[in-house]
Amino acid sequence: MSFEKVAFEKDSSRALKDKKLRKALVSVTDRFRAARERASAQVGDWNELRTRGREIKKETIENLDKYLIMLEESVKRAGGEVHWAGDAAEACETIIGIARDGEVSSVVKSKSMATEEIELNSAFERAGIKVVETDLGEYIIQLAGEHPSHIIAPAIHKTKDDISLLFSEKLGIPYYAEPEELTKAARERLRSEFLSAGMGVSGANFAVAETGTIVIVENEGNARLTTTVPKIHVALVGIEKLVPRYQDLSLFLTLLARSATGQKSSTYVSFTTGPKRDTDTDGPKEFHLVLLDNGRSAILSSEETRESLYCIRCGACLNNCPVYRQVGGHSYGWVYSGPIGAIINPQLMGIDKAPELPFASSLCGACRDVCPVKIDFPKVLLDLRKQVVDKKSGTNRVGWHLFEILGIKFWRIVVEHRSLYEAANKIAYYLQTPWKKGNGNLDSLPYPLSRWTNERDFPQIAKKPFHKRWIRIKRELGEGKNKT
Amino acid sequence: MSKRSREEILHRVRKGLATVKTPALVPPDSRDFSKEAKAVIKSLRNNQDNLVERFVTEAQNVNTSVMRAKDSKKLIQSILRLVKEKSLKSFALWDTAYIKELGIKERLKEEGLKVVTVKNKNRIAKADLGITEADYAIADTGTLVLLTDKDRPRGVSLLPPIHLAILRPENMVSNIRDLFILLKDRIDTSGDVKSCMTFITGPSRTADIELNLTLGVHGPKELYVIIS
Amino acid sequence: MQNKLEKNVIKAYIFVTCLVDTFFPEVGESVVRVLDRLGVETEFLEDQTCCGQPAFNSGYQDDVRVVAERFLKVFERVLNEGSEKEVYIVCPSGSCTSMVKVFYQELFHNNLSLLNIVKKISARTFEFTDFLVNVLNITDVGAEYGGVLTYHDSCHMLRELGVGDTPRELIRSVKGIEFTEMEMHDACCGFGGTFSVKFPDVSVSMLDEKIDCITKSGADTVVSADMGCLMNIGGALSRRKIPIKVMHIADLLAKGGKVS
């Protein structure tokens, strides 16, 4: 499956009709939201940790060139190889090159959103190399040929029955109703893949510049298997995933698990520094770090939106977003969804591919309240909205946007001139007459206000606005005082 | 190709950051790891029982089975009890000084169990039980910390369906921050970072199917810790 | 217990907001009456129109700057008041207040002289309930109303201004009411300004959940400090013929009207 232009309104309207999906979304987000609240409340200085998390990420991003070079040196010192990939095509080419050099015919993958970004699986398939997703959620959607709908729980839009059916169809096994049996089936099927694969591809949650360590956080154990068993390990890491010092990990690991799933610690955290040492009994003989740009460096040049790169991919923003809660991940049209998707999809895909996304938010700010690195989502969204407007202003687009520009210009003239403001008020009062309802509201207004009145009454313009009442009010108050 | 990309990427990064007049610099959390490590160790010694209690509670909360053994004899007995209970036939284990001292390998062979060679990953995968030590443990979260080294393969704590870790109470740390102080001190002293360190907090799990918690997805289904 | 307010010490300029001015002028009236009851001198600068927020949220920063500059010019008078009274700008809308107090600083961060004026005006600008409780130090305004009330936290007020306690303190002091907190009281109602017409399906879906929480709460009246939210919530309640009232907190506090 490939990614085209984001069609948020269309996709979200369709998603809203999917009752099964709605139920799953409420269930997942409620659960994760409550868990995060509980887990963060256990930490006395949680807010200070978040502030420090933001500071360290700011330091990392503002000194990114230095830390990238430091990371490269550290990885090399540990016996690993470092590759730099400017874009998706190059990253795929690099990784496939490594596979060919190692005469690899089958690859196991652990969960990595960066690999989804570059559409690595398709590239492997085109190159005739077998690739198997091993994270259970990702395995499920790989079988289904879909994209993940949530950063942490990619198959959450699928019911038990969906998955039972899928497994029985695609794996040729009996229809198992219970998660226990489905999981056992996946474990057995994937175990043999792990043991026979020539290469394991992973992402990383963090890459430590000081020591060249890459850190992977998981619950299933498939990432450990992916990065331990095959003879070659390739880690694809976005350039923004760095942290400066080894010790910084203690802060970020505390922030990540609690923000993502509400666990005090996820089941496994692997810290990999280079390939196996000569004295190690097992472990990959080759370690390759592929650093991915793919649009991240462009985000650096915008001061207003640079903090989009602080994200540690915990998913807390998704779980607290009232918009995501209604529509789920697929509406965001690309790898990332929810508030983080709304800000980085347009920046990484190019704003022309996702002009709706910065507006697909009520700017409520719930995301900012829970972000472990305090990303100011509303601020970034507002700046992206400005960018969309600025880009469109030069064109002769007819339709909704023209409507909007004319509306804004009209509004501006009216509010700039007091006499026009008062006149517009009076005129509007009379113009609204055909749409007056018995209950004191307006109904069935023409487009674009029909988008309001289809489901809601609209208030009437008052006969006497406040500015026309002021003198009378002042007089009444004065008389009242004189009376006492 | 990669070399040119390296220059291009670094160039783009520098260009993007050109407007940053004073790049942020955060004072590191610790400056003198050697000194702080000593302080951590001192406070741990005074708190050991407390830490062990906390560890046990947290570990049990994440489905880890915890056993306490007053001496080596009791420790071996605990392992044997487990083996009998589950009718385990084969095992893989780390070859450390402490494990050698305990004589676990000999004792289990006496009981008729097969010891698999750890040099072959397929063999480890077929073992019923993997026995390791834990280099450290974090009381706050019930986490075991395992460092990879000679004769301490990664697969032993990962491939067999049951993992048993032997933990010595003096290796218990209170929280993750203290742990990283000790780890960094260790790295500074030895001048070397191990190829792989693993934090283990409970058996393998997933909630990917309708948020139902299922144990034993890819990693071990059961985790036992014996505190010696 | 009520703090007595010395008369003629405080003067409040009403920043009525274009929404209240045009659609809900009685809310403006309520603000004035409550303040007057408490001994605050009120004034209204007739020249005011709009703070610019709707266009700001739509990405038209340059147009907004012009409108915002006009707002600053109108209210600059407040700074040059030159009386012995403490002067403030009081606004019955959390979102419009946050526009002036928070977003004007971002709009003008490159213009030092305007930024200076923004900072001075921001310091004197308060959302209505924030003003009553934190400036006048009053929580009991002598209001009386019979009913079961619940309160909806409007997003900008709660998260940009950090104001969530003051409305509740004021509501709880109203004689005769029963207050009940609804589930997810701080969840967005789906208004978001133009968001409500840009993505109406999503907006209404969020609104459905909010209506659900309101009806489950057992309240017969839902109170808020933002007419944007209330026209969204109220618009759905009246369309669905649900007999629950919406009420701006100023209107609530104006009821009864006795000050001891």
Image (cartoon, rainbow, N blue to C red):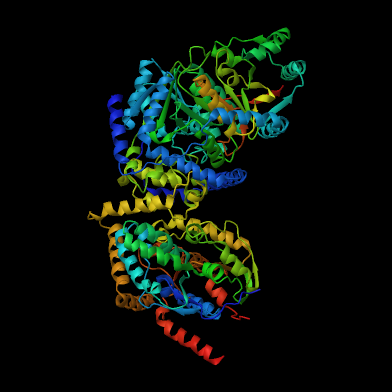
Q: On the rendered structure, is C153 left or right of A105?
A: right
Instruction: From the top left corner, tell me how far across and down residue C68 is, in percent.
Output: 34, 65
Instruction: From the top left corner, tell me how far across and down residue C39 is, in percent.
Output: 54, 80
* Residue at the extreme bottom of the image, as rendered: A483
Task: Please identify the quarter of the rendering in which residue B54 is found.
Answer: top right
Task: Please identify the quarter of the rendering in which residue C214 is found.
Answer: bottom right
Q: On the rendered structure, is C44 left or right of B47?
A: left
The quadrant of the rendering that contains the C terminus of chain A is bottom right
The residue located at (44%, 86%) in the rendering is A472
Above or below A363: residue A64: above
The residue located at (27%, 64%) in the rendering is A406
Q: On the rendered structure, is C46 left or right of B131?
A: left
Instruction: From the top left corner, tell me how far across and down residue A345 is, in percent.
Output: 38, 43
User: What is the tally of numbered marks visible in this picture?
Assistant: 0
Above or below C128: residue A476: below
Instruction: From the top left corner, tell me how far across and down residue C179 is, in percent.
Output: 64, 66
- Does residue B203 appear in the picture of this structure? no
Above or below C46: residue A251: above
Depth check: give the residue in front, B189 or C67: B189
Depth check: give the residue in front, A343 or C94: C94
Depth check: give the residue in front, B161 or C78: C78
- Does residue B172 appear in the picture of this structure? yes
Q: On the rendered structure, is C251 left or right of C64?
A: right
